[in-house]
């Protein structure tokens, strides 16, 4: 009896295993494209005034600062906001790692076009998520992150890619708020430096050395400028985040 033959192309187990993965990746990218088009980019939106509202929420309503004790209060609350912002970034990193698995890739090149996130940001966020404390539920979650997650879970075509996209804009809001506090801190430090000893400024800003404080001031001025500089105006952006 002649052996059974088939005139169709040979199919291997690797083909069978990888085909659904490729189809799923293409579908996830298309769902993200549709999501961005439907929501005119993102469902989560924020305006410039919201960054200031977040900042004043952390300063407990205080928006005017004059003294060294105000400076110390400002730095403590900036650190608290920075911690909250890091939680948003760790949640983003976790979603990015899930997206990477969904797309069956080991690099982050897909994120530049699909999510407007540079590979550097993806690597940093993924690293923070990987090394988050697994026994601390607050390490990768807070009320705002949970709100975004619930919204994405209710979507018919929700995916880690869409979750990453929405979380990236939540993170950008809290980054903007944190930067506003840093601007204010540097402005006040410079204003007080004419009448306050360096030791008091170091105590208030929690800096270890005068040279470190000068570098901090220089970094802020080079990237954000002085009061009134247009770079200080926060806004939600749909350009590549580096």
Image: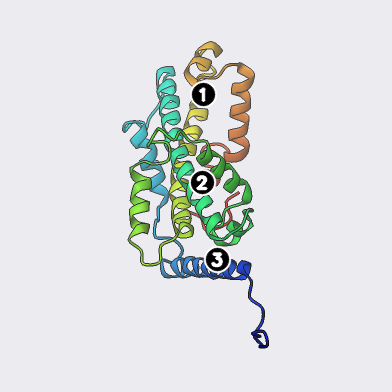
Q: Which residue is mark 1?
A: 189
Relative to the observer, which residue lies in front, 21 or 114?
21
Q: Which residue is mark 3?
A: 21
Q: Residue 93 has which mark?
A: 2
Q: Position of residue 43 (x, y in %)?
A: 39, 60
At 53% from the left and 50% from the top, the residue drawn is 97
Horizontal placement of 207 versus 144: left or right? right
Q: Residues within 10 Å of mark 1 (few under 14, many from 20)?
A: many
Which residue sits furthest front?
A: 1
Position of 215 relative to 43 (above/below): above
Question: Do tag 3 and tag 2 residues touch (Cβ < 8 Å)?
Answer: no
Q: Position of residue 171 (x, y in %)?
A: 46, 46
Q: Marks 3 and 2: which is nearer the front?
A: 3
Relative to the observer, which residue lies in front, 50 or 232?
50
C-alpha gap between disc 3 and disc 2? 22 Å
Can residue 9 be seen here? The reply is yes
Position of 43 relative to 167 (above/below): below
Q: Residue 142 has which mark?
A: none
Secondary element under disc 2, as helix, strand or loop, is helix
Q: Residues within 10 Å of mark 3 (few under 14, many from 20)?
A: some
- Sequence-first disc among 3 and 1: 3
At 40% from the left and 28% from the top, the residue drawn is 77
Question: Do tag 3 and tag 1 residues touch (Cβ < 8 Å)?
Answer: no
- Sequence-first disc among 3 and 2: 3
Horizontal placement of 55 versus 109: left or right? left
- Sequence-first disc among 1 and 2: 2
Q: Residues within 10 Å of mark 2 (few under 14, many from 20)?
A: many
Can residue 176 be seen here? The reply is no
C-alpha gap between disc 3 and disc 1? 54 Å
Q: Marks 1 and 2: which is nearer the front?
A: 2
C-alpha gap between disc 1 and disc 2? 34 Å
Relative to the observer, which residue lies in front, 50 or 146?
146
């Amino acid at each position: 009896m002649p052996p059974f033959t088939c005139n169709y192309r040979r199919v291997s187990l690797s083909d069978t295993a990888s085909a659904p993965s490729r189809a799923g990746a293409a579908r996830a990218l298309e769902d993200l494209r549709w999501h961005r088009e439907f929501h005119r980019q993102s469902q989560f939106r924020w305006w410039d005034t919201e960054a200031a509202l977040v900042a004043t929420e952390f300063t407990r309503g205080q928006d005017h600062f004059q003294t060294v004790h105000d400076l110390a209060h400002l730095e403590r609350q900036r650190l608290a906001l920075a911690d909250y912002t890091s939680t948003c970034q760790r949640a983003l990193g976790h979603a990015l790692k899930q997206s990477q698995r969904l797309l069956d890739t080991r690099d982050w090149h897909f994120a530049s076009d699909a999510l407007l996130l540079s590979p550097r940001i993806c690597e940093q966020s993924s690293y923070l998520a990987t090394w988050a404390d697994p026994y601390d539920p607050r390490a990768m979650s807070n009320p705002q992150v949970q709100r975004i997650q619930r919204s994405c879970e209710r979507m018919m075509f929700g995916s880690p890619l869409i979750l990453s996209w929405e979380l990236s804009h939540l993170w950008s809001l809290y980054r903007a708020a944190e930067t506003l506090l840093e601007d204010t801190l540097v402005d006040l430090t410079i204003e007080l430096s004419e009448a306050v000893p360096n030791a008091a400024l170091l105590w208030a800003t929690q800096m270890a050395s005068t040279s470190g404080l000068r570098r901090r001031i220089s970094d802020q001025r080079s990237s954000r400028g002085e009061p009134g500089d247009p770079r200080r105006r926060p806004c939600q952006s749909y350009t590549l985040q580096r």
